[in-house]
Image (cartoon, helix red, strand yellow):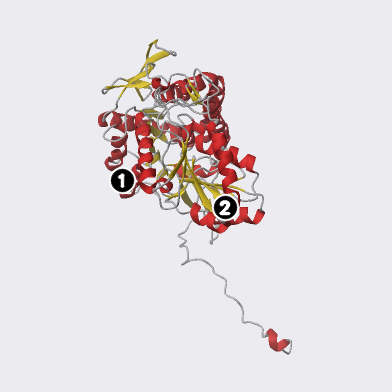
Amino acid sequence: MKAFSSKYGNTLEFGHLIGGEEVFEGRVLERRNPSDLEDLVARFPEGTKETLRKAALKAREAFKEWSETPAPVRGQVLFNLAKILEREKATLTRLMVREVGKTFKEAGGDVQEAIDTAIFFASEGRRLYGQTVPSEMRNKELFTFRRPLGVVGMITAGNFPIAVPSWKLIPAVLAGNTVVWKPSDDSPVLSYIFVKLFEEAGLPPGVINVVFGGGKDSTGQWLVELMDEGLLNKFAFTGSTKVGRWIGEVAGRNLIRPTLELGGKNPLVVMRDADLDLAVEGAWWSAFATGGQRCTSAGNILVDAPIYEEFKRRFLERTEATVVGNPLLHPEVTYGPFINERLFQRWLEHHTWGQEDGATLLFGQGRITRENPYPRFQGDPEAGLYGWPTVWEARPGMRQFTEEIFGPTINLVKVDGIEEAIEVANATPYGLSSAIYTHHRHWAYLFKVGIRAGMTSINNTTVGAEAHLPFGGVKASGNGARESGIWVIEEYTYWHAVNEEYSGRLQLAQMDTGYVSPKAPTPWAEVLGF
């Protein structure tokens, strides 16, 4: 690793981390600060398929020793990691603000989620329980054990560059697996340092190997293709539904169980009895936190007809007060830039969708520039890619309503009553997060049992997660796998059933079992004279 001065700190040059060694292999890529593109954050290589093979083989070599390491000892490594992350929280937070454009508040929360996850799973190292199961025959005992799967391939997104990788890396290594990780090319420095902190915590070389690069026709694609070469035993992915479907296909033909955390078009319902001040604040944060660049960001706000106009008025007032800009220089901003140009260009497309479908634009004017200024912008809008907070009125069936946009855009949709609200909330292909604002207990009940989503909040936002709660979706938002909490252990282990014979002879289940036959029945009705 080398470092030299840049605009907001040092530029780092580094290689892939394979088997504990730094490997400089592949063409050089750059990552610039999305808030100010003059600031060069990193130079790093794009891994080739051969680079990935090396990493997978090193992971396979490390698997035997690591999988045989007692689980409580593996947990101790994670406890060490939690303390190290706490020590480096301020540094990682500032780096995240610089590298991916998050605000200090959100970046600090991102790092804290990894700390919480490490603490939670450190203790799970003493709770990787199996069971003792009664046998149907004498002198025999039955047991179940959790076993690690082997080498796990991982791809993560850049919008949560520490939290989301921690949901995958930490339970994977706790369970005794080894990893080949392709992080987002939007957050290479954070990923490099994260693995280095694992190593400082005592993780042996080769347990986590990181290979940098892009997605399609690059490192990410080639990592997925390693499943066809028999080099991976598990795959975990966070990203788009389109890519997730393809990964699921490759995993399926190799009889590998993938963990797929995909997109969302998350509904937030505001019923006529809601606390409007609370609902407006929650809807605004759900829409514009991280500039809408969260898989759990609200996509459609469904407002009950009797309060629709009043909610719209208040929500637009709140939206107009949103502060946008460079979070490094202006910590008070609500959100910063687009993480990359690809997401920005996709966001620009949605304006055409809205116009074609007849949606009504209530607020927003596209990209923020000097010629198209946003009144509450802080800094130089031309230094990065920034977008106006944008509000539409839309209807079910519109592309605007149906597709994930992944930017600072929200739709207001009028509904009439709880039944229509649930119907409309379910009218997208996605099923990740959801929320309802109401004090009516029955309406809340109907929503939580009627919504097709993996997560639901009542009188809270669509965004946010806790380390001990399952995270994931249904429908086009995922394949039912869950991240976080004890439930994720199922994704990184298999159940091993063992029977141990003590009788000294062959006993065959079902055939040699001493089943008990019932006696002849007593005619109780006759006895009682009925």
- Residue 522 appears in view: yes
Q: Nearer the viewer, mark 1 or mark 2?
A: 2
Residue 282, x across and y down, in percent:
58, 39
- Residue 503 appears in view: no
Examine the image and state in which quarter residue 214 appears.
top left
Few, some or many residues within 10 Å of mark 1 (<14, 14–19, 20+): some
Q: Nearer the viewer, residue 444 or 64?
A: 444
Q: Which mark is residue 272?
A: none
Depicted 36 relative to depicted 515: above or below: above
**Left-right relation of 119 to 386:** right
CA–CA distance between discs 1 and 2?
46 Å
Q: Nearer the viewer, residue 349 or 335?
A: 349
**Marks 1 and 2, the one that precedes in the sequence:** 1
| Numbered disc total | 2
The C terminus sits in image quarter: bottom right
Q: Nearer the viewer, residue 277 or 265?
A: 277
Residue 333, x across and y down, in percent:
53, 25
Examine the image and state in which quarter residue 340 appears.
top left
Per the image, the residue denoted by label 1 is 250
Per the image, the residue denoted by label 2 is 305
Q: Secondary structure at mark 1?
A: helix
The N terminus sits in image quarter: top left
State the residue lying farthest toward the top: 5
Q: Secondary structure at mark 2?
A: helix
Residue 82, x across and y down, in percent:
55, 26
| Amino acid identity at mark 2 | Ala
| Amino acid identity at mark 1 | Val
